[in-house]
Amino acid sequence: MKTKTQVAIIGSGPSGLLLGQLLNKAGIDNIIVERVSPDYILGRIRAGILEQGFVDLVREAGVNQRMDEEGHVHDGFDIAYYGKRYRIDLNKLTEGSTVMCYGQTEITRDLMAARDAAGLTSFYESQDVQLHNVASDSPQVTLFKDGETITIDCDYIAGCDGFHGISRQTIPAEKRTEHERVYPFGWLGLLADVPPVSDELIYCKTERGFALASMRSATRSRYYLQVPLTDKVENWSDEAFWDELKKRLPEDSASNLITGPSIEKSIAPLRSFVCEPMQWGNLYLVGDAAHIVPPTGAKGLNLAASDVSTLYKLLQKRYAHGDLTAPQRYSEIALRRVWHGERFSWWMSNMLHDFEQGEVNGMHKATFDRFMQSELDFYLTHEEGQKVIARQYVGMPYEEVN
C-alpha cells in the first residue's frame, strides 16, 4: 500500500500529536506513525507543569477546554533549603507570568480525542518503521501493519519518537554531535490519589537528599525522592517511601502530609542530552528525540512544545507563503531555546541535589558543596537572584519566526 502526505510525524506522544493538530488547523496534511498502542501511551506517567507558551500553543491548537477547566494555575513555588522555605513568586517576579499544572497524560488524551474527531490518519502499533531518503526532496516512511507494508511519500518528516526512537539514529553518526551528562542518582516517583501537601510545588534540599512535592490535581499527588542509581523500586514499600518523604519535607508540610496506596512507582535516571543539529535534510527532530533534561527545572515537555511551535511556524511559511528555505532554519532557532532550558535544568539539579563522594564537575565534592551553598544562598535571599530563577522557570519567550 502506498499513500502520500505533506508531513509524516513519527511518534504519537504529546509533541507529535500537538504538531499534527496545529498543522491540520493550518491546512497542512499529516500522518502519524506510532509503534505502540494509544493505551500504552496513555499509561505513561509524566510531567505536568506547563509554561505559559505551551498553554498558549494548546489554546491555538483548539484543545484547551479541559485544560482550562481542570488545570491549576500556579503563581509560584517553594524551595525548602535545609528546612527553611523560600517562595519564588512567579507572578510578581516576572510581572504577571505563571505556570499551569495539568498532567502530560491529560494533554495527550485531549490531543488524541481531537485527532480522532478530525478523522486524521494515524498508524498505531506499526512494526519495522524505517525512514528513507531523508536528505532528498522525496523522503519516505515505511512500516509494516496488519500483514502489509505501507509506504508513505511525504515532503517532510518530524521525528517526535523520543530518545530511543528511529529518527535520531537515521541521521548519520558522523553528521551529528551528541552532548551528554549522566547524573549519579535517580528520582523515585510515587503517584497516589491523595490531596497534595501544598497548593504549589515544593523543591527540597536536605541533608538526606533532594525531594519534590508535586501534584496532578486537587486529589492526586506526585512525589519524588532522590535515590542512588543502584536502587530498585522493589526495595521501596509505600510505607518506606512515605516515611522518607516526611523526613525530607519541611516540618509544617510533613505534619500535614496525607498518605495512601501508590498508583504507580518508578525510578527515573537523570541526564542532560543534546543532539546537534536537530535536522538532517528534510528530517526534523522534536522533543526527546533531540534533547533530554533532568526534570528538576520542569523543562522537558516545555522544550518539546517550543520545538513544535518553531517547526509549525516554519512549515506554515513553507506552505502558506511558498518560502521553500524556511524549514532549513529550524535547528538554528530551536537550539537557542533548548540550550537555555538545558543550562537551567543542569543548574537547578546541581544546586538542589546531594552528590556522592569524590569529584563533581571536576572538583572535590566538599568544594562543590560549598560553591553550591554559596550560590543558592545568594539566589534565594536576594530578589535579583529570585528573579533569575522565576524568569527561567516560567520559560523564555518563544523566538519570533520571521
Image (cartoon, grey):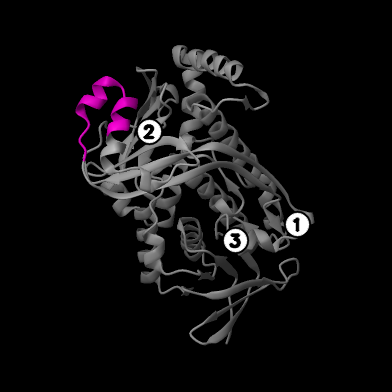
Badge 2 element: strand
Residue that numbered label 3 is attached to = 159
Upstream in the sequence, badge 3 or badge 2?
3
Residue at the far front in the pictured view: 235
Crowd band around label 3 with a 10 angstrom C-alpha radius: few (<14), some (14–19), many (20+): many
Q: Is residue 141 above or below residue 236?
A: below
Give the residue drawn at x 58%, y 58%: 164
Q: Is 17 colored magenta in this rendering?
A: no
Give the residue drawn at x 55%, y 18%: 369
Compute the Cα span from label 1 to label 3: 16 Å
Lateral position of residue 293 relative to residue 59, left or right: right
Compute the Cα span from label 3 to label 2: 31 Å
Give the residue drawn at x 25%, y 39%: 239
Please name whichever residue, 25 or 49, is drawn nearer the observer in this view of the structure.
49
Q: Which residues are magenta?
A: 243-259
Contact flag, marks 3 and 2 (Cβ < 8 Å): no
Q: Position of residue 92 (x, y in %)?
A: 39, 22
> Where on the picture, by quarter, is residue 359?
top right
Lateral position of residue 192 relative to residue 317, left or right: left
Residue 399 visible, this orientation: no
Residue that numbered label 1 is attached to = 173
**In this view, the mark in front (1 or 3):** 1
Q: Say which amino acid is labelled 2.
A: Leu
Compute the Cα span from label 2 to label 1: 37 Å
